[in-house]
Amino acid sequence: EAGVTQFPSHSVIEKGQTVTLRCDPISGHDNLYWYRRVMGKEIKFLLHFVKESKQDESGMPNNRFLAERTGGTYSTLKVQPAELEDSGVYFCASSPQTTADTQYFGPGTRLTVL
Amino acid sequence: AQSVTQLGSHVSVSEGALVLLRCNYSSSVPPYLFWYVQYPNQGLQLLLKYTTGATLVKGINGFEAEFKKSETSFHLTKPSAHMSDAAEYFCALTGTSYDKVIFGPGTSLSVIP
């Protein structure tokens, strides 16, 4: 069974540009989560999808961040325009409805904003 | 509010020595507790988890952790460190099955030959 995949693995952009991160959850997992770790800080929750619906987006830092999950499959996280403080590692995780107590994480996307 | 603290941002042990990584938590509801590991250039991998039942939990690669409610602790141990254990370890909790994961700050483990 394939795990959670994320693309790209690394992204380097300049301040003011737009970046889109993609996450493909484990097949059949209805729950999809985004987290991020900025330099030297803890991994923090951003938002939670159940299928295509946003269940909890309390962790989204501001309106420069837009997450979508079309058709309840893969998800994208767009940052527009990117700021220096957006640099960090963005993790995606997924879990099934039946055994939702464990989230399975992807390898992360390292975003660097110059 | 829920929170997780990990004592020691960096821990060094000799190969073959006991590994002890400390984790304490605060939660207003009975928590689900986890240890995740991140090896260099890799993603987060689940080591072990406690949900209900037996308080001593065994995980992969010889690691185990004990849930102690009276001490609000969930320390991670391994009897004998191996070079391949060098990684960053995260203690984490959720309040319910579907809840967001609250992570501790992480402990970087170095294993000295």
Image (tube, coloured by chain):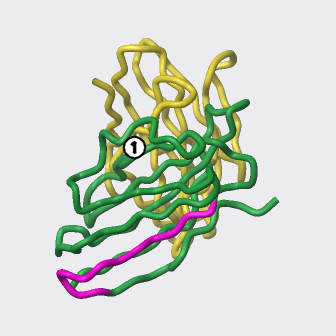
Chain colours: A green, B yellow
Q: Position of residue B76 (x, y in %)?
A: 53, 40
Type of the residue with mark 1: Phe
- The answer, for residue B98, to whether it is visible in the render is yes
Q: Position of residue B24 (x, y in %)?
A: 38, 31
**B74 or A71: nearer the eye?**
A71
Indicate yes or no whether the magenta region holds residue A16: yes
Q: Is residue A46 magenta?
A: no
Q: Return the residue at label 1.
A: B103
In the image, residue B108 sits, relative to residue B68, either above or below, namely below
Q: Chain of mark 1?
A: B
Front-most of B103 and A74? A74
Q: Give percent across and percent down for residue A107.
A: 55, 67
What percent of the width, then of the height, locates residue A87?
Answer: 27, 72
Q: Quadrant of residue A37?
A: bottom left
**Residue A39 sits above or below residue B96 on the image:** below
Kindly identify the residue that appears in the image at 30 percent across and 44 percent down: A59
Q: Is residue B86 at all visible to an observer of this figure? A: no
Q: Quadrant of the C terminus of chain B?
A: bottom right
The image quarter in which residue A73 lies = bottom right
Residue at x 61%, y 69% (from the top left corner): B83
Q: Looking at the image, which residue is at 22% across and 87% down?
A: A14
Residue under the point 21% across and 74% down:
A81
Label 1: how many residues lie within 10 Å, few (<14), some (14-19) or many (20+)?
many
Q: Quadrant of the N terminus of chain B?
A: top left
| Residue placed most toward the observer, A86 or A57 | A57
What residue range appears in magenta?
A13-24
Tell whether B60 sits left or right of A104. Answer: right
Judged from the image, the secondary structure of the residue bearing numbered disc 1 is strand
Q: Is residue A48 above or below residue B12?
A: above
On the rendered structure, is B60 left or right of B19?
right
